[in-house]
Amino acid sequence: MPDARKQSNARRYEMEDAALSAFAVFFSQSPSFLDSQVRMQKQLGRNNASSLFGVHEIPCDNQIRNLLDPVPPETVYPVLAEIGDALYQQGYLAEFRSINDTLLIALDGTDFFSSEKISCACCSETRLKNDRVLYRHIAVTPVLVAPGQANAIPLPPEFVQPQDGQDKQDCELAASARWLARWGEHYRPWRITYLGDDLYCHQSHCPAGAGATGRLLFTRKLESHATPLRVGRRFRAQRATRPRVQARRVGKKHFTDTYRYAHQVPLRNTDDAVECGQRI
């Protein structure tokens, strides 16, 4: 990891110690983990942070922040990518194959910090109903998922933050497009189907996803897209599609699901509209 400190013989902590100590907290899911390890070291002369994670000297919380805050997040992207690559190359992702024998990557944004008082240059701003401003840190966090799989495989993220040369505030959709541009070719050989909610089912975004893989499975809200809704109603009225009936059981209850599916439905009422398949 890059070290922003000036060269000095008075250094006590290495960047490696700060990074491993921070990782240990997330791994153990205990905010007080490092404090307990310091006490263990004083009482027993050893600690788990050293034996399990290879930490030589345990920095305090403030020291960890001072050392790691200047490090660009992109520094650790290769680590996440290499983990996924290793799982794929060793065949561990075979059980994750699903629709048409593809792997599923779910695209979604998540807030990992918000405040009405604390802000920085990387914040997104949301105007609240009380006219106050909520400052947020958001990231698109793609993960490999599969039906019936309890585990999800994290992939490199993309942060929602101001971009050079852009006056408009950054957003989740733009960040996901950047992710596809950066990583789409990398994951193309894996045969991917990208998953997303209604936000991603957008005329300007679908070509980016299709260019990366050709396979998209996005949720579409009825109220968000008038043209597919109108076309679907016409198909139903004309009985242009055959229903598919599927029985399923949940515990002691039995359910019957009836589907109608149409292809080549325009996403909007324009000549250049993306055509999609939809349940009607």
Image (tube, helix red, strand yellow):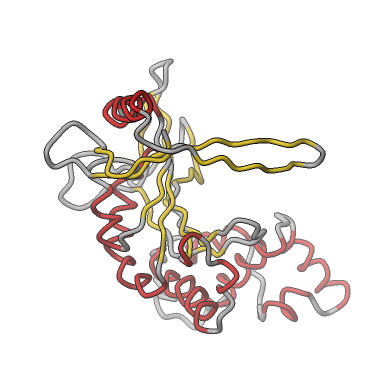
Q: Residue furthest left?
A: 271
What residue is rendered at 68% in x and 43% in y? 248
Q: As displayed, is residue 135 above or below residue 76?
A: above
Residue 174 appears left or right of 104: left
Image location (x, y in percent) of residue 254: 74, 37
Q: As displayed, is residue 207 above or below residue 224?
A: below
**Residue situated in front as seen by the camera: 163 or 171:** 171
What residue is rendered at 49% in x and 61% in y? 66
Q: As displayed, is residue 99 above or below residue 14?
A: above
Image location (x, y in percent) of residue 170: 28, 43
Give the quadrant of residue 264: top left
What residue is rendered at 72% in x and 63% in y? 28
**Residue situated in front as seen by the camera: 173 or 246:** 246
**Residue situated in front as seen by the camera: 80 or 198:** 198
Residue 109 appears left or right of 275: right
Q: As displayed, is residue 211 above or below residue 88?
A: above
**Residue situated in front as seen by the camera: 27 or 268:** 268
Q: Tally the marks.
A: 0
Q: Which quadrant: the C terminus?
A: top left
Image location (x, y in percent) of residue 48: 77, 74
Q: Residue furthest top?
A: 130
Q: Residue furthest right?
A: 44
Residue 38 appears left or right of 13: right
Q: Which quadrant: the N terminus?
A: bottom left
Give the quadrant of residue 222: top left
What residue is rendered at 53% in x and 67% in y? 97
Image location (x, y in percent) of residue 2: 40, 75
Give the quadrant of residue 145: bottom right
